[in-house]
Amino acid sequence: MFEFLIPPVIIFLLSFLDIEKVKRFMPIVGATMLVPIVLSFGKGDINYFNHTFLLNDLAKYILLVSVIVGIGISLALISLDKHVKISKNAYKNFYRFFAIFWMGLTLSILSNNMGIYWIGLESATLSTVYMIKTNSSLSAHKEAWNYMIVGTIAISLILFGIILIYASAKPLLGEDAMKFSVLLANIKYIKNGYLFEIGFAFVSVGMFVKMGFFPMNLWLANIERASFYPVAALFSGILESAIMIGFFKFSSIAKEVNYSHLIGFGFLYTILTLFIVSFLIYRVKDFMRLFSLSGIEHMAIIAVFWISGAHFAALLHFGAHAFLKPALFVSTGVLESGGKYHIAGALKGYKDFKGKLFVFIVGLLMLAIVSLPPSPMFFSELYGFGTMINIAKNSNHLILMLVGIGLLLLFLAIIFYKFIEVYQSMKYDGVSKEKKVYFSELFAISLYGVCTAVLLSPFAFAFLRSI
Amino acid sequence: MVDFFIGLFLANLIVSLFTTRLYRLLLWYSLNSLSLGMAALLIGQKLNDTPMMITGIVTIILKGIFLPYILKFLSKKFKLDRQVSPNIKVPYSIILVPAVIVFTFYLTEPIVSMIGGNQNYVALSVAAMFLSLILMLEHKNVAPKIIGFLSMENALFLLGISATGGMPMLIELGIFFDLLMAVVVINLLFRKEEISNV
């Protein structure tokens, strides 16, 4: 298990050296994490420390996605100082807390224990606070405190829920009640189903607050706006991955307790979130908030697909979002280089080959994130909504489900309209000024693009269907 | 005796809601943590639960002594404003606090009926969580917000020991580790220009 933690530890240690000399080695160190993950694909489920950590197919997939995102971000970090003003010390500290963040979330993803899952999430939350602070602006200072307070309230709600879930199962399972796999196998024998459901509701609300769901739709967008762009990329690629794997595990157990409660709760929350987010996106005026709010939209879709039983669609959508969104956030760093963030003409002024390639990839990313074919998101939504209708056919709620899907599609159409408008404005409006793109960030964006394309391959589909 | 310490735990939290001086607030937090640690120690002794007793001792040392000391040191180092007036006036708080506690007893009734052990402690821990949230909300200054966050962590710890008969030792130690990390981050976050209002 330690093979997954050694690369972040090395990044942490390297950050104490001259950062200008060592920053090029960081992506290589991060990439070494791919070796044990790739090797683990040939084996079945691997457990560590008496099932405290479990590397099953779901964890392998999410860990692989998060590691690729981590490698891409460490690539993009090489040229961070070319786009923003950052002191040498803050640059070092960013790497240091990035490593702690990565370690914490790797622990959360691998964890089969609710408590350790929470500890990983909490350490990632705290390390993010300082990453926000590396931007020396006053708004970043305020948002760092804001994140500290709201983030810890959210994480406390999750812990509160975990305690209630543990209390509901401990009389039957003892200390093993902390383990997801044991809880899932024995949930039918637990008498306190109501207590479990209350615990699950608290856990879900805590997770939803952390992801910016209703009613906390703007706090995350404001924080991402105030901080440097790699923070937003880390949020969308790694932090949300870790939260989502937790939601997948908790909701799988809740499904066994009372499926109709889960469906009702999940749908209501998702539709409310999408309702608010679609109109917030419609009014948005800068890239960072646009992509941040779009992240909330995609997380809501993934959650609703998962609880509807469309696991393949949820995982495909999850993977595509985890690659596309960090790529867009890294692109935002380039587009807003020097603190200018005008949407109009943002894609103009890139002259050389690197610049033209960048414009081409950003165009593809923008169209892929709104689910235009052949984006994996197009297929995931097709499969997801199809599964939702199939499930409703076997129940008495077909009309209700169709109304729900209709509402979701309506909100997605508003978001689609806004993205296309923004893309057209980036391409055709405004004035042309010469801009520069660096190799490292272009490499990072290309890596994410290639990984998104790989998700469409037959073996990726087969693997996702097997989870 | 456990009842006495749990009562003291709640009393210290209630008093901290009315406090207008920073060092006094740190003292109430320290006493809040000490009484919680003592309660955990006594419950652990009663149940013959060594991990809970260890957790109680760690709570006394870490939260009762170390954290308040560090926070006082930081507040001196960064010259924090020692006048921390709450936004909610004291007469209103006097009405609000009992209302929250009574409301919590009704709110938690369906939950506590399913939990073994002392059901009143569960209701009190949820009440303590609400009161900690009020502490965070009623202040503009950063320091009382931090105390509110730490008090909320104490409330969750009480819920853990009362509702579940103690969380696994590994988890408790992990939470303590995160708490230490929070202090490191708070230290890094403190800078003169942002101390006044957030």
Image: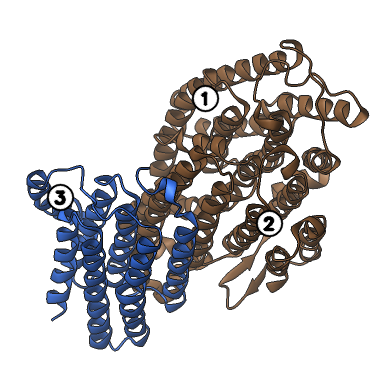
Chain colours: A brown, B blue
Examine the rendered structure and indicate whether residue A100 appears above or below residue A412: below
Is label 1 on the same chain as label 3?
Answer: no
Which quadrant of the view contains residue A338? top right
Calculate the distance from the C-alpha at mark 2 to the C-alpha at mark 3.
43 Å
The one nearer the camera, B86 or A259, is B86
Residue A295 at x, y percent in the picture: 58, 35
Mark carried by residue A63: 2
The one nearer the camera, B50 or A430, is A430
Examine the rendered structure and indicate whether residue B161 appears above or below residue A324: below
* Pointer 1 chain: A
Judge from the rendering whether residue B23 lies leftward or rightward of residue A147; answer left or right: left
The answer to whether residue A84 is visible is yes
Q: Helix, strand or loop at disc 1? A: helix
Label 1 with label 2: CB-CB less than 8 Å: no
Number of marks drawn: 3
Is label 1 on the same chain as label 2?
Answer: yes
Calculate the distance from the C-alpha at mark 1 to the C-alpha at mark 3.
38 Å
Q: Residue at x 58, y 44 (%)?
A: A135
Q: Amino acid at mark 2?
A: Leu
Residue at the right extreme of this rendering: A353
Q: Helix, strand or loop at disc 3? A: helix
Quickly name the residue at label 1: A408
